[in-house]
Image: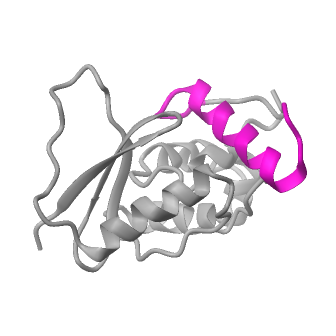
Amino acid sequence: MALQKTYYQSPIGLLKICGTQQYIAEVSFHDTSEKTPGHSKQMSPILINCVEQLIQYFNGERKKFELPLNQNGTAFQQEVWGLLVSIPFGKTISYLDLATQTGDAKATRAVANANGKNNIAIIVPCHRVIGAKGELTGYAGGLWRKKWLLQHEAKYAHGVQTLF
């Protein structure tokens, strides 16, 4: 099944969104220094719905995404991504907490690796995972974006203006 793509200019940069008629496969930050991106001529209703839900999220009107998702990965990666989706809007957990949820508290590096392989940014909220001491660590989109996303969610979830 051919992937379609579109782009959405979010408050934290250009997002590339790929999917099919059945699911979303990718939401990633697009380096604007690259060639001007092209869009699929016809977008599936799922891609349109994804953009609409992202707009609602950035406007503070959506706390949970309702989209069919599909990304390739190992069984362990799929497990970690499933756990990420269960982290509530405006909350964070540590890599250790996430590893413990997989049944192996010693798997923090494996969990961090799976977190880093997530191709569906924001919707599969890998930005909600932080260091054990509450510090911001690793984010494929850059730590400034992770900080922005966490502050954005805290503002709409708890009325908090600054976390880090």
Q: Residue furthest bottom?
A: 22
Q: Residue furthest top?
A: 33
x%, y% of residue 158? 89, 52
Q: Main secondary structure of the magenta part?
A: helix
Q: Is residue 118 left or right of residue 103?
A: left
Decide which of 43, 130 is in the foreground and name it: 43
- Identify the residue shown where x is 65% and y is 41%: 149
x%, y% of residue 87? 70, 62
Decide which of 61, 148 is in the foreground and name it: 61
Task: Find residue 163 and report its image quarter.
Answer: top right
Q: Is residue 118 left or right of residue 81?
A: left
Task: Find residue 61 and report its image quarter.
Answer: bottom right
Q: In the image, which residues are magenta?
A: 138-162
Is residue 93 visible to the viewer in this orientation of the structure? no
- Identify the residue shown where x is 42% and y is 69%: 75
- The answer to whether residue 71 is above or below residue 129 is below
x%, y% of residue 140? 47, 34
- Identify the residue shown where x is 52% and y is 27%: 142
Badge count? 0
Q: Is residue 89 left or right of residue 68?
A: right
